[in-house]
Amino acid sequence: MDVSGASGQPRSGDDQPTEHPAVPTPPPPAPEAPAPTEDGPDTDPAATGTPGPEAVRPEAARAEKPEGETPGPAEPATPETGTHEGGTHEADEAGTRPAHTPADDDGTAPPAAPHHEPHPHPDPEAHRTLAHTEPHTEPPAGPGMAKGKPPRPPKEPGGGILMGRPFGVPVYVAPSWFLVAALITWVFGGQLDRVLPELGAARYLVSLFFAVAFYASVLVHELAHTVAAIRFKLPVRRIQLQFFGGVSEIEKEAETPGREFVLAFVGPLLSLVLAGLFYLAMKPVQPGTVPGVLLAGLMVSNLIVAAFNLLPGLPLDGGRMLRAVVWKITGKPMSGTVAAAWVGRALAVAVLVGLPLLNSSGGLGGGTEDTGGMDTVTDALLAAILAAIIWTGAGNSLRMARLREHLPELRARTLTRRAVPVETDTPLSEALRRANAAGARALVVVDADGHPLSLVRESAIVGVPEHRRPWVPVSGLAQDLTDDMRVSAELSGEELLDALRAAPATEYLVVENTGEIYGVLSAADVERAFVKAMARPS
């Protein structure tokens, strides 16, 4: 498996040293930097023994402390305080995180940079109504590896105004909805002026009620997707009502094409049922009245919602149904995604060209004597927005399918760096010497019994000038281990990303199922491997 994009080097099964460079060393200090006093220890103390690769196991973790290596008082160790640019970060939940600086391939390291999430977030399955905005990009939730403490779920992003939690799923109204509500109120109010001129200015109140009732129908459409997902034990992150419809953010992909088809079809089906109910409610109502006009408008709007979403192209529900059919025939989910995404792009072009032509020919109410230049511009603008949303959604579906295809290539065992254990009072210079001798690229601080206590931060090492390293103990550069920062060497794909997201950090301790230390996993290595895997064609 090609994982050359990651700078981390795994520990081989036979515990042979690797050929990768050791922990990076910055350039020599500037000439004006103060030199150590004669009373201090040498700049590179000698050690009585050099632990080999086997030292990463707990039973051999305790290393002898050479005499004369105790840090002198002339240069006291000062813990490094990291800063984060860009405001609040999700890592703040677990304490302040230092900026992470990945090592270059030649062993040198660039200046410290702000810490980023270890991966670009994967997109959940999003079933949308009418048209689809940019999809949410967060990986599906999965089991973590922390013992006795499940990983914390990610914080919900700001989705607008929280309206409630039906079936335990939060429903948000995005700010863009108010723009659409105002547009619907204005357009429908103009139509009411032609049908019910006696309403006067009150027609806009009726139009606003129609906008709210229409989006209530959209919410029912999305709840249908949500109920089906819950029935199939697929977690639903949230429902959001937004510009041009709504979106149900389902965090897992359906396991079978049959479930995918049902999950997509229930939304348009509920819209058709609502259209039928509004039609039946309209029967006893006198035409030309406010209730009659509202019921007729809601019936037609739900028919349009159902018909539009049944179009066989991603990201619409009909596209997911087409994907399920191709998936069933070929046995390959990716083949279904590619087919449905390209049909979606063709639909985007058809909407861009065909919708204005259809309106101007009178097919959707155009071609009347009231049609003017403003209506033509409005039709063209609406067609362009819908086409852009469909085209973008189809492209995102392709990218997310490629992401899911490459996720299994991310394996903790493959990306883990070899590590050597050092005791808390070991000078940094001696710890680096041992790491270089063992071909390791990470340091684990252990107690007298060899139990891991903390991880030495790579960014902190880079920040210590070489002439000060004999005076700085590794404990001053380490980050205390928490349960969530211990990950299993067997993790891969979505489970690995979930474990890292549950406890944002720059380094993680990788352990075997037996509890033995396997090495240290750098979040930057995971990110580089992810980007390289995504760059390869499917």
Image (cartoon, rainbow, N blue to C red):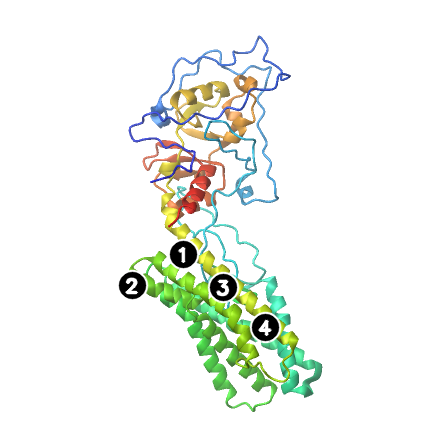
Nearest to the eye among marks 2 and 1: give it.
2
Amino acid type, mark 2: Ile
Q: Are marks 3 and 2 in contact (CB under 8 Å)?
A: no
Q: Which residue is mark 3?
A: 390
Tag 2, which secondary structure? Answer: helix
Tag 1, which secondary structure? Answer: loop
Specify whether 307 is left or right of 367.
Answer: left
Quadrant, the N terminus: top left
* CA–CA distance in space, label 1 to label 4: 37 Å
Q: Looking at the image, is 468 positioned above or below residue 97?
A: above
Nearest to the eye among marks 4 and 3: give it.
4
Q: Which mark is residue 379?
A: 4
Q: Quadrant of residue 346?
A: bottom left
Q: Which residue is mark 2?
A: 329
Comes first in the chain, label 2 or label 1? 1
Comes first in the chain, label 1 or label 3? 1
Residue count near mark 4 (Cα–Cα under 10 Å), binned few <14, some 14–19, many ≥20: some
Residue 503 appears anywhere in the view: yes
Q: Are marks 2 and 1 in contact (CB under 8 Å)?
A: no
Amino acid type, mark 3: Ile
Amino acid type, mark 4: Asp
Q: Are marks 4 and 3 in contact (CB under 8 Å)?
A: no
Specify whether 13 is left or right of 35.
Answer: left
Amino acid type, mark 1: Lys
Nearest to the eye among marks 1 and 4: give it.
4
Question: Can you give x and y, in whole percent of width and height, for residue 191 in the image?
Answer: 62, 81
Comes first in the chain, label 2 or label 4? 2
Nearest to the eye among marks 2 and 4: give it.
4
Q: Which mark is residue 1?
A: none
Q: Quadrant of residue 196?
A: bottom right
Q: Which residue is mark 1?
A: 252
Using the image as rendered, state which of residue 303 and residue 61 is in the foreground.
303
